[in-house]
């Protein structure tokens, strides 16, 4: 492991985590989006370590694992915590309270992935591709080997990068194409002009992208237009509430199915794996249990949970269990689609806590924040573990690097958030001209409850049933929930993959995967660079 986890790698990874975390928090608040940093940090780690000399692919892998960790912690924080100020502009929230929430989510994400890593990464019982992890592996491998694949990779990456700059920096290419003529018929369609989305669609393949598109057809082609015209719903808003609740329910039902059939029956094996050979040493073996107990002990004392009095511990336990479920759901979604709706998972746990504390909005947002950070980090870690598995990297080295990068990211993200709030005022959060923070606005709005409870429970039941039938119900739910403009380019990528497989039967598809990784990486790298520039000049 000494050639994988190195002092210089940890230093580079930590410094990178500070920069990526700060820029990620800013862009999440400002743009309401967060590009995966995985490809950017993989390339940066490779460039820096090769310049220093004497490196190898495993050291590069461990270094970029540390560097990317803070970004998703920042995302979980930015997508939830601003709801505190949106709901109460005059409130003053202590830095230490928010830091404890963020560190708690980070510890829970680390603990959950320590238990589920081997099932999701090494097991042959499922088909989770983790497209971002695959893209990171292909990018580093092609860059290291050179030759034809390197030429394809950097050519497609360059094209994607130029496209992104023309779109985002100079406005020469529209970010979104809307089918405005269909809106009069209550069909809300569009196309996100994103090479990254096309690349993701190609990597995850025609099956999952086809089911994803089917979800979009059900949600936006049937539920809204047919439902309104047939009188099933009073108006578009009612139909849209049904659509969102059904999609969320399907994702939750699948998560429960994964737990009931994939995780709980194997809990002894999973725990044994977590305490096994890859986690030698007292700290590594007992880390998941220590982390969970520490969170349960600290949250009722050091955060807004303390306002609940005697039921604080119960609310915390619900939050911890919910964060564990969210980590599993994040692994499934990231593995199938490359998408991690961490704020939605946070909202679900928030609603569970709401049963105990219906009027304690600060507590509800706190539960959402812990969960979103845990889910965000879990998705990032599973991508890194997938790349590491392909490289043959020791997962213990990756876990150590991810722990360092994530904890540094937890501190940096909270510091940056408070700096931005102090500089711009609490009224800047939710302000469309400063920090729109749309996900945090959704968290604030959902503190009132699920829009359509009946549709949600129907979705939960269907999600569990479809999972038992081995149907990709979580991807279906994601297609019903997410806007069509996100689905369209991802479906296009899957369609390209299908056509290639039909035309070129029994031929290797690595070139196609490398090109897709380049499209994905070009936009992701450029997006991170533009975010860093925007943050530095803010």
Image (spheres, helix red, strand yellow):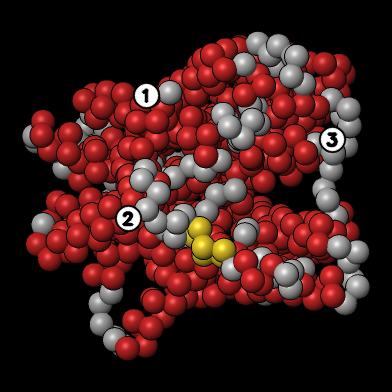
N-term-proximal mark, 1 vs 3: 3
- Image quadrant in which you'd find residue 457: bottom right
Q: On the rendered image, what quadrant is the C terminus found in?
A: top left
Q: Which residue is mark 2?
A: 163
- Does 240 appear above or below 349? below
* Residue for point 66% across, 45% down: 345
Q: Is residue 267 left or right of residue 339?
A: right
* Residue for point 88% across, 37% down: 355
Q: What number of labels is visible?
A: 3
Numbered disc 2: secondary structure: helix
N-term-proximal mark, 3 vs 2: 2
* Residue for point 28% across, 70% down: 512
- Is residue 330 or residue 515 the one in the foreground? 515
* Residue for point 25% across, 82% down: 507
Q: Residue 167: give x, y in percent of width and height.
A: 38, 51
N-term-proximal mark, 2 vs 1: 2
Eye-nearest disc, 1 or 3:
1
Q: Residue 9: give x, y in percent of width and height.
A: 24, 29
Q: Is residue 132 left or right of residue 183?
A: left
Eye-nearest disc, 3 or 2:
2
How much space separates mark 2 and mark 1, taking CA atoms? 23 Å
Badges 3 and 2: C-beta atoms under 8 Å apart?
A: no
Q: On the rendered image, what quadrant is the N terminus found in?
A: top left
Q: Which residue is mark 3?
A: 354
How much space separates mark 1 and mark 3, taking CA atoms? 39 Å
- Is residue 533 or residue 352 the one in the foreground? 533
The label shown at residue 536 is: 1
Specify whether residue 401 is in view: no
The label shown at residue 32 is: none
């Amino acid at each position: 492991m000494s050639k994988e986890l190195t002092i210089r790698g940890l230093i580079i990874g930590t410094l990178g985590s500070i920069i990526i975390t700060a820029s990620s928090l800013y862009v999440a608040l400002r743009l309401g989006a967060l590009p995966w940093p995985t490809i950017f940090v993989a390339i940066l780690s490779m460039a820096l370590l090769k310049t220093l000399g004497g490196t190898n692919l495993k050291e590069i892998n461990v270094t970029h694992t540390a560097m990317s960790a803070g970004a998703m912690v920042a995302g979980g924080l930015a997508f939830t915590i601003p709801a505190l100020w949106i709901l109460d502009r005059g409130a003053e929230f202590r830095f230490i309270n928010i830091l404890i929430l963020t560190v708690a989510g980070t510890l829970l994400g680390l603990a959950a992935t320590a238990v589920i890593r081997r099932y999701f990464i090494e097991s042959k019982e499922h088909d989770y591709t983790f497209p971002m992890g695959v893209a990171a592996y292909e990018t580093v491998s092609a860059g290291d080997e050179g030759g034809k694949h390197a030429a394809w990779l950097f050519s497609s990456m360059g094209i994607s990068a130029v496209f992104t700059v023309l779109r985002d920096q100079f406005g020469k290419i529209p970010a979104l194409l809307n089918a405005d003529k269909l809106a009069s018929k209550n069909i809300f369609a569009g196309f996100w002009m994103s090479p990254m989305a096309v690349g993701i669609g190609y990597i995850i393949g025609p099956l999952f992208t086809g089911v994803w598109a089917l979800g979009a057809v059900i949600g936006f082609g049937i539920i809204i237009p047919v439902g309104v015209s047939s009188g099933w719903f009073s108006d578009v808003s009612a139909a849209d509430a049904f659509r969102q609740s059904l999609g969320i329910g399907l994702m939750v039902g699948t998560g429960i199915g994964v737990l009931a059939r994939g995780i709980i029956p194997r809990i002894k094996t999973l725990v044994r794996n977590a305490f096994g050979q890859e986690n030698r040493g007292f700290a590594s073996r007992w880390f998941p249990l220590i982390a969970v107990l520490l969170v349960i002990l600290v949250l009722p004392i050091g955060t807004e949970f303390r306002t609940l009095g005697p039921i604080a511990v119960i609310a915390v336990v619900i939050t911890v269990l919910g964060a564990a479920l969210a980590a599993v759901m994040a692994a499934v979604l990231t593995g199938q689609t490359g998408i991690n709706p961490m704020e939605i998972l946070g909202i679900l746990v928030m609603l569970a806590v709401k049963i105990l504390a219906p009027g304690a909005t600060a507590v509800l947002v706190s539960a959402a924040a812990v969960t979103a950070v845990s889910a965000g980090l879990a998705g990032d870690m599973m991508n890194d573990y997938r790349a590491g598995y392909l490289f043959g990297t020791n997962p213990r080295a990756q876990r150590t690097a991810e722990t360092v990068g994530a904890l540094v990211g937890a501190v940096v993200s909270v510091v940056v958030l408070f700096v931005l709030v102090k500089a711009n005022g609490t009224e800047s959060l939710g302000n469309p001209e400063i920090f729109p923070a749309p996900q945090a606005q959704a968290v604030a709005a959902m503190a009132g409850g699920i829009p359509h409870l009946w549709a949600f429970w129907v979705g939960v039941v269907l999600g569990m049933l479809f999972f038992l039938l081995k149907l990709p119900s979580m991807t279906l739910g994601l297609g019903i929930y997410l806007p069509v403009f996100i689905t369209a380019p991802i479906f296009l990528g899957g369609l390209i993959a299908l056509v290639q497989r039909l035309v070129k039967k029994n031929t290797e598809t690595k070139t196609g995967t490398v090109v897709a990784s380049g499209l994905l990486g070009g936009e992701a790298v450029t997006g991170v660079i533009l975010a860093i520039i925007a943050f530095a000049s803010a």
